[in-house]
Amino acid sequence: MKNGAKKTIAVLLSVLLLFSAMSAGSFAADTAYGPYEYDDIATGPDGPREPVKSASMKPAEKFFYNALNFIADGLLKVIVGLYPAPSTWKNVDEFDDTYYLKGRETYATEAAEDNFWSVGYGSRSIIPDDFTADKYYIGRDLTNRLAQGINDDCRVRAAAFDDNSGEGIVIFAAADALGVTSADTLAVRENVIKWAEEQGVKIAALNLSATHSHSAIDAQGVATESIYKLLTAGFKNMFRIDKDQRLENAENFKKFYIGAITEAVKEAIGDMKAGKLYYAKVDFDEYHVDKRGLIADEDLPDTAMFKFVPDDGSAGLVMADIACHPTTFSAGNGLFSGDYIYYMEQRIEEKTGCRFLFTQGASGQVSKKNVGVDESKLPEEERLGATTRYVGKVFADLLIGSELEELPPVLNAKYTNFMYTPTNLILALAVKAQLVNNQVYRDGLGLRNIKIAMEEGYVEFGGRVGLCLFPVELYPEVFRGVGIINGGDYAAVSWDGGDWDAPVPEQLAPREGIDMFALHLCNDSLGYCVPDNNFAFFGHIIGDEIADETLSLGKNTASMVVSEFEKLMRSF
């Protein structure tokens, strides 16, 4: 091509970009896709995922695993029954719902004349200043792996939203952590609400969720001295020993962690400015896949992406829920990392000037596909985290290139709380051993008398976007009614060998025209939510090497989760 032709094309492209930049309803002008640093050694496209082994097991194999489940359940009943419960557990009639917020009082269907959006942002590191090697644990590694260093920061990010109707602010905060607990959520709410009352600020809702990075700092406590706690908690429970010098560092971290979240939320409230809020529904089908091979790519959840543009021209906000595990940076590296989220944040800020808040969608066993780097082709000093950096940029650009629609200033929020008895006795043992600090109550002394306090919620933006909030690690099919349930393509290969006809949360919008999305691990982390007809326990743990049922409330968790959400949505 001659130089003159090249120049002509360059001028035409510049003019095109100039006109694109004038469009408030599009992100596309903010950046161009790639080229990326590692395009020349990118991997993919990945091939299709075959269904997991359990999908084709013969009846004899399933009988063996079901028998193993029956035997294990019997042994656990004895062990958990004999294991002393913590003295701190209260009776259900002592349940205090003060900081289980109810949301907004009125369900608004249109914006009042004087409504307008105001949004603020805050952020803090959750890696303590006194970090040294061999002092803090990596959240996903249950072998008690102590972090040896920091690859990139682990943070809490918060955004505060208000339509200025007088109904109160709605807050979303997300920590770079494997999960969050109800006790920590309630502690943050108490801190923020007491401060807000002093400031004359009304809080309608405060949501704390986890990004679910597998290489982040252990904020739940489940990986911190887990074996020691399991072996000694029964003795301490029996003799009501509350203090343990070996766990003092973990207790100090909790105070720091809750304080950091509190400060990030307060910063977000103080940062609130008037402006316009936009929304895009982003298709991630090209880049994520169900590892079990039981959900077609096109049936996986889309992403809700919001962009806030302040009237004063200051830094805006991008918020997105992405259903894809942040597992591109292995916990085995021994370093703390926020995974691809950290690099998404960098890319979005670099290309748009916006701050970034990531929330985790219904990701079950969903991971990345068609995007990666052959790190073996890089110099040794560049290999660590190359794929993570690459994924962050690609995901960020997919958001940045989305077409946006403006949302009218209408904000709704509503919540429900309830008690549930875990039938998975491994989880019952975990709460007795206080591996995590979930809110646990009882109404008697038996195994069926253990009650875990739970909450679900719904937040709606502009009468167009509904965010459905769940305290579990939600499988996409439970939210969307696809795959192995509700007559889906793979129902016949479920563990029970049949369908599961259940309410579909995605279809429970209060009115027509609302796009529904799931945020899971929100306000608590109560294990995996597997469809009732595919709860295999050892059939998956051993047969498929997927240990989800180990960390689940039990076989009928999904029924409970969707039925409670249906009640909430029917109450509008």
Image (tube, rainbow, N blue to C red):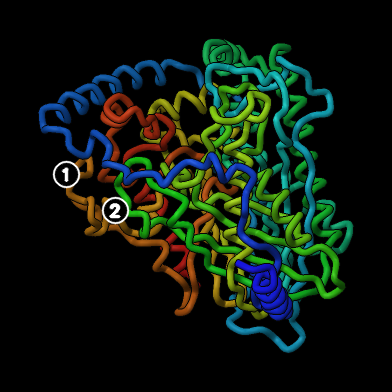
Ranked by sequence position, the earlier of labels 1 and 2 is 2
* Count of residue discs: 2
Judged left or right of residue 46, residue 278 is right
- Residue type for callout 1: Gly
In the image shown, does 483 or 152 lie closer to the viewer?
152
What secondary structure is marked by label 1? loop
Q: CA distance from mark 1 to mark 2?
A: 13 Å
Badge 1 local density, few (<14 within 10 Å), some, or many (20+)?
some
Is residue 526 positioned above or below 332 on the image?
below
Measuring 35% from the left and 17% from the top, which residue is drawn there?
A: 78
- Residue type for callout 2: Gly
Residue 150: give x, y in percent of width and height: 72, 27
Judged left or right of residue 246, residue 323 is left
Q: Which numbered tag is attached to residue 497?
A: 1
Residue 98: give x, y in percent of width and height: 67, 51
Question: Which is in the foreground here, disc 1 or disc 2?
Answer: 2
Residue 24: give x, y in percent of width and height: 70, 78
Badge 2 local density, few (<14 within 10 Å), some, or many (20+)?
many
What secondary structure is marked by label 2? loop
Is residue 51 positioned above or below 241 on the image?
below
- Res. 356 image quadrant: bottom right
Measuring 66% from the left and 40% from the top, which residue is drawn there?
A: 176
Q: Which residue is mark 2?
A: 483
